[in-house]
Amino acid sequence: METLNIKGMMKNRHLSKAIAKQKLYDFKSKLQYKCEKRGIEFMEVDKWFPSSKMCSNCGTIKQDLKLSDRVYRCECGLVIDRDYNASINLSRYQLVV
């Protein structure tokens, strides 16, 4: 799970109501509890870790990747769904850090 600056996000008066409705702290607590109950390691990933921008094949970081780019294309030839690429990188997070 990505670490988020909830206090900082709550300072934005346009977003604070929507963020409060999401109850992210409750969700995180429940997810952490369920993981512990099932013997699954719960891990928080730094919000600056480039999981979406890093190629899961060669490790190159693509700085110019836009949120609208749904397919990740790397110079090494890898073409993969952006979210799937990020999930592979997140599963390897502990090995990278």
Image (spheres, helix red, strand yellow):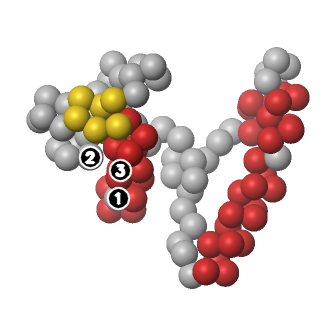
* Three-letter amino acid code of the residue under disc 2: Ser
The reply to whether discs 3 and 2 touch (Cβ–Cβ < 8 Å) is yes
- The residue identified by callout 2 is 56
Compare residues 71 and 22 and report the one nearer the observer: 71
Q: Tag 2, which secondary structure?
A: loop
Residue 95 in view (yes/no): yes
Rendered view: 73 above or below 80: above
Mark 3 neighbour density, 10 Å: few (under 14) some (14–19) many (20 or more): many
Left or right: residue 96 versus residue 12 is left
Residue 60 in view (yes/no): no
Mark 2 neighbour density, 10 Å: few (under 14) some (14–19) many (20 or more): many
Q: Which mark is residue 89?
A: 3
Q: Total marks drawn?
A: 3
Q: Which mark is residue 32?
A: none
Q: Residue at x 67, y 81 (%)?
A: 37
Q: Tag 3, which secondary structure?
A: helix
- The residue identified by callout 1 is 92
